[in-house]
Image (tube, rainbow, N blue to C red):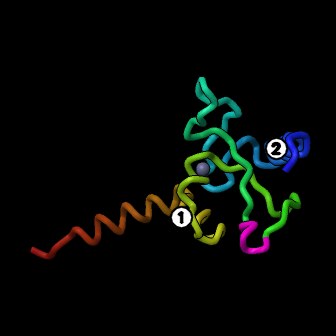
Amino acid sequence: MRRRRRNRIAKVLRAAQHGRCAYCQRRLTTSTRPGGRPYWNTETIEHLQRRAEGGTDRLENLALVCYECNSLRGSMPWVLFATIRQRHVRSLERMLAYCNGWRPG
Ligand SMILES: [Zn+2]
C-alpha cells in the first residue's frame, strides 16, 4: 500500500475507532521508539481477512490495531481474536482459572 493512501486510511480509521485498537481497545500511539521500532501500542494497519486468504486493501477489510495484537493474532480468524482480546473475556478467563483450581475438600 502506498504511503499516501496508508496515511489517509489511518486517519479515517483513527476517527472511526476513537484512536483505540480494534481488538483490545487500548489507546494507540503513532510514535515509535528511537530507531523506528514500535511500542506495544504503536498503531499498525491490519488486514482483517489476510491478503493470503483473498483479503483486499479496501477500507472495509482494514482496521487499526496495536503492534502487540498484530504480533499475537497469527492465523486466527479476526472475529475470534477480537473476542478473546476483549476485557470481559479476560475476566471470564480469570474466573475459569479460579473454578478449575478449586477442589472440593
Ligand atoms: Zn490491541
**In the image, residue 13 above or below residue 88:** above
Callout 2: SS:
helix
| Disc 1 Cβ-to-ligand 1 distance below 8 Å | no
Based on the displayed image, in which of its 4 quarters is residue 93 positioned? bottom left
| Residue 51 located within the stretch drawn in magenta | yes
Callout 2, which amino acid? Answer: Ala
Based on the displayed image, in which of its 4 quarters is residue 74 positioned? bottom right
Can you name the residue that lies furthest to the left here? 105
Q: Position of residue 105 (x, y in %)?
A: 9, 74
Q: Which residue is mark 1?
A: 84
Q: Residue at x 63, y 56 (%)?
A: 23
Q: Residue at x 64, y 38 (%)?
A: 42
Callout 1, which amino acid? Answer: Ile
Callout 1: SS:
helix
Q: Are marks 2 and 1 in contact (CB under 8 Å)?
A: no
| Residue 89 located within the stretch drawn in magenta | no
Q: Residue at x 75, y 66 (%)?
A: 51
Dominant secondary structure (helix, strand or loop) of the stretch shown in magenta: helix
**In the image, residue 28 above or below residue 54:** above
Can you name the residue that lies furthest to the top here? 34
Based on the displayed image, in which of its 4 quarters is residue 10 positioned? top right
Q: Which residues are magenta?
A: 50-54
Q: Which residue is mark 2?
A: 10
